[in-house]
Image (tube, rainbow, N blue to C red):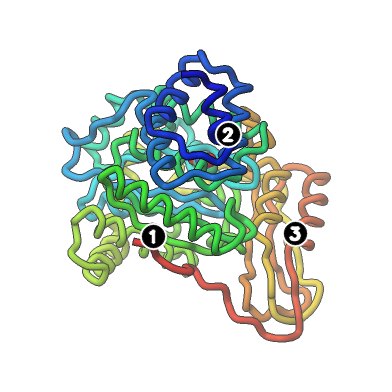
Amino acid sequence: MRAVDIIIKKRDKQELTAHEIEWFIQGYTSGEIPDYQAAAWAMTVLLNGMSDDETTALTLAMARSGEMLDLSGAVEIAVDKHSTGGVGDKTTLVVAPLVAACGLPVGKMSGRGLGFSGGTLDKLESICGFRADLTTEQFLRQMADIGVVVCGQTADLAPADGKLYALRDVTGTVQSIPLIASSIMSKKIAAGAQAIVLDVKVGCGAFMKTLPEAEQLARLMVEIARKTGRKAVAYLSDMNQPLGKAVGNALELREAIDTLQCRGPKDFEEHCLEIASRMMVVGKQSPSMDKACLTVEQTLRNGQAWEKFLAWIAAQGGDVQMVIDPQKLPTSAIQRQILAPQTGYLHQVHAEKVGLAAVLLGAGRAKKGDPIDYGVGIEVLGKVGQMVQKGEPLFIVHANDEQTLHQAQEMLLEAIVIKENPVEPLPHFYGVIE
Ligand code: URA
């Protein structure tokens, strides 16, 4: 077999066999197939698409390119959740201990923020001492002992995806639905998930800007799960405006702590309760969503989820005093309100612009490996549909210098649209695909 023939076959819109895909991915992982051929191939996939069978074969080939975790010794059924990424999305920080406190262990590998979208590990690392680089053995032990563990992906988990993703990032080939679906699902399968709740974000602050695109991605991932003997349920959730009120690492961690203590923003709490309940159903801990919702809500209200959160942070070396007293978490030197320039209804709080303003303040990275500032970020006080008065605060910017504060302020004023006519609030969810 020759790599060039596989590229030509896809260029000519023919379907690749599972064997050809496996061979190509193995060759690329081992270094026998160079980056330029893999880049050409990724571009043919972006332009010509892939059938569901091809995408499933690609998913499995990438999952098998490294270590495949077997969680059966640690848990009865391994349940995972995955968000496609957005602005203010701190759901894992609440849902992981909440579901674990309901008796269903959660072991999750998470990522760091890139571009306007934040990452769970960065938020957790606002806590002094928190360790995200666990070995497989530590991961399995903590999952069995505490029932909850969240760490970074080991280098040996789906290495083909790691290599291909970095290449796609610099060759204009990220925005391909089969490549995104196989990238996400290969990591979930390699990490041992048997049941997965997918949170596919849609809107201006997400990878998928439109509902049809998001729906296509969600359906494809659910189908890959089915074809590989797993179960997945996908939510289509709004990411036109930030989720909750906090954007920025320590700010988001504080909001997660508030939510675990039942004083978080309503939209974010509802989001967490829904995702957690669905995990209970796919993890066979609850026979129905109604029963799961009751259990999950009770576990949040009676403080057991909060207790589990403390045990989890302590198990990964985090300074528990910082979460018991969140004033000890990193803060910024300057906090400045941004006021509504006019009276009216909020028609837009553009999630991507808010995310980019947070990155500019130092909460995110322009490129992989850049340092981040845990204390900076934005509190988003207004939601679409809300009536605001001229002079009322819409945002609180947390910054460490006047120059970036000023630039962020301008971006945030561009992120909002206020009009005289009323507008409906945005929905949390646009649908569920089972
Ligand atoms: N997230 C991933 O893990 N892979 C993609 O290709 C896009 C988003």
Which is more toward the observer, 252 or 161? 161
Kindly tell me whether residue 257 is visible in this rendering. Answer: no
Residue shown at the point (77%, 43%) measured from the top left: 401
Mark nearest the camera among 1 and 2 is: 2
The label number, if any, that marks residue 261 in the structure image: 1
Q: CA distance from mark 1 to mark 2?
A: 46 Å
Q: Is residue 245 left or right of residue 138?
A: right
User: Which amino acid lies under the numbered mark 2 shown in the image of this protein?
Assistant: Ala
* Above or below 351: residue 50: above
SS of the residue under disc 1: loop
Kindly tell me whether residue 156 is visible in this rendering. Answer: yes
Q: CA distance from mark 1 to mark 3?
A: 29 Å
Mark nearest the camera among 3 and 2 is: 2
The label number, if any, that marks residue 42 in the structure image: 2
Residue shown at the point (54%, 24%) measured from the top left: 5
Say which quadrant the C terminus sits in: bottom left
Residue shown at the point (54%, 45%) measured from the top left: 49
Mark nearest the camera among 1 and 3 is: 3
User: Which amino acid lies under the numbered mark 1 shown in the image of this protein?
Assistant: Gln
The label number, if any, that marks residue 412 in the structure image: 3
Q: CA distance from mark 3 to mark 2?
A: 36 Å
Find residue 250 and report its horizontal and vertical position in percent: 55, 46
Q: Is residue 377 left or right of residue 155?
A: right
Q: Is residue 379 left or right of residue 191?
A: right
Which is more toward the observer, 368 or 260? 368
Find residue 391 and report its horizontal and vertical position in percent: 77, 74
Asked if the residues shown at circle 3 and circle 2 are in contact, with their CB atoms under 8 angstroms apart, the answer is no
Which is more toward the observer, 301 or 192? 192
SS of the residue under disc 2: helix
